[in-house]
Image (tube, rainbow, N blue to C red):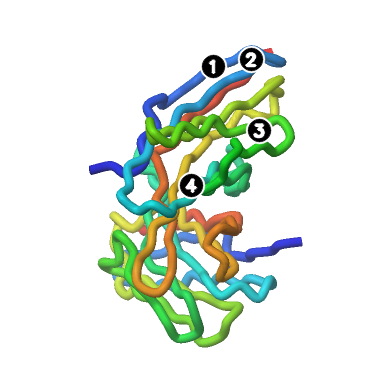
């Protein structure tokens, strides 16, 4: 069963508008963390924002915020005031314990296109 | 600033060759990771290491091995390259603190002919 689900293969948004990218997760571990990464067409993976399962408040980083709904097991990324440079693939990931460390499990991504 | 360097941006090899992909980080991170990325499949973990000479299999280790002789360097080895290993390979590193993000290199686009 998929542990991270991103149901939107592609999304379109007008420049300066806000957009929400969906992410749902599945875990039985009471302590977990969720990450969002951006991957432009050049290929590098850029860390955007992190939410820990015990964090009381939703994470925010500049124009990025996380709409964390623990009971629904969702961690949606909200990008406010979209810019042309926001066009990229966006990946949601959850950390999972394995052996002596923690690994990340990634969703399949959402391709965001910002239109002028 | 954080820096993860992968030895090649593009690489073309032939079926049956032994292929080495190198990754170096300059942040004294304990954990290092190798992923492959294919269209529609996202990132899949091949191997990771949480200490020098330590390694753990990820989700798709078949056909690969790794080496971590020094803390800053993590090598991915394709023992006998096959065409189904044509892919984008991404290396990442992270501090021991599990709440810290992984930092990625720019990736190596590997083609096996």
**B16 sits left or right of A38 in the view:** left
Q: Is mark 4 on a helix, strand or loop?
A: loop
Q: Residue shown at 54%/26% (left/top)?
A: A112
Q: How far apart are marks 4 and 3 (CA)?
A: 18 Å
Front disc: 3 or 1: 3
Residue identified by numbered label 4: A53
Q: Residue shown at 51%/75% (left/top)?
A: B74
The local crowd at label 2, few if under 14, some if 14 to 19, many if 20 or more residues have their Cα within 10 Å, is: few
Residue identified by numbered label 2: A115
Q: Are marks 3 and 2 on the same chain?
A: yes
Q: How far apart are marks 3 and 2 (CA)?
A: 18 Å
Front disc: 3 or 2: 3
Tag 1 or tag 3, which sits nearer the N-term? 1
Q: Residue shown at 37%/58% (left/top)?
A: B112
Q: Do labels 2 and 4 touch, CB within 8 Å?
A: no
Query: Percent from the top left, x then y, of residue A2?
Result: 28, 42
Q: How far apart are marks 3 and 1 (CA)?
A: 17 Å
* Above or below: residue B38 compared with residue B89: above
* Above or below: residue A75 compared with residue B61: above
The quadrant where residue A102 appears: bottom left
Residue B104 appears in view: no
Residue under mark 4: which chain is it in? A
Q: Is mark 2 on a helix, strand or loop?
A: strand
Residue under mark 2: which chain is it in? A
Name the outermost residue toward the left. Answer: A1
Q: Is mark 1 on a helix, strand or loop?
A: strand
Mark linked to residue A64: 3
């Amino acid at each position: 069963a998929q542990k991270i689900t991103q149901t939107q293969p592609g999304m379109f948004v007008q420049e300066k508008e806000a957009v929400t990218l969906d992410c749902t997760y599945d875990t039985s571990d009471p302590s977990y963390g969720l990450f969002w990464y951006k991957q432009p067409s050049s290929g590098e993976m850029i860390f955007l924002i992190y939410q820990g399962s015990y964090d009381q408040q939703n994470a925010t980083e500049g124009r990025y915020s996380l709409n964390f709904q623990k009971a629904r097991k969702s961690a949606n990324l909200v990008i406010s005031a979209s810019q042309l440079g926001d066009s990229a693939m966006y990946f949601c990931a959850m950390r999972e314990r394995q052996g002596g460390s923690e690994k990340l499990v990634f969703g399949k991504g959402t391709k965001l296109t910002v239109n002028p | 600033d954080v820096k993860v360097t992968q030895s090649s941006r593009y690489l073309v090899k032939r079926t049956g060759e032994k292929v080495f992909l190198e990754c170096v980080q300059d942040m004294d991170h304990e954990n290092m990771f190798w992923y492959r990325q294919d269209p529609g499949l996202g990132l899949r973990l091949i191997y990771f290491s949480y200490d020098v000479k330590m390694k753990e299999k990820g989700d798709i280790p078949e056909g690969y091995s790794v080496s971590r002789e020094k803390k800053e360097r993590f090598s991915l080895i394709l023992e006998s390259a096959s065409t189904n290993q044509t892919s984008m390979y991404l290396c990442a590193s992270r501090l021991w603190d599990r709440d810290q993000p992984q930092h990625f290199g720019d990736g190596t686009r590997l083609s096996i002919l």
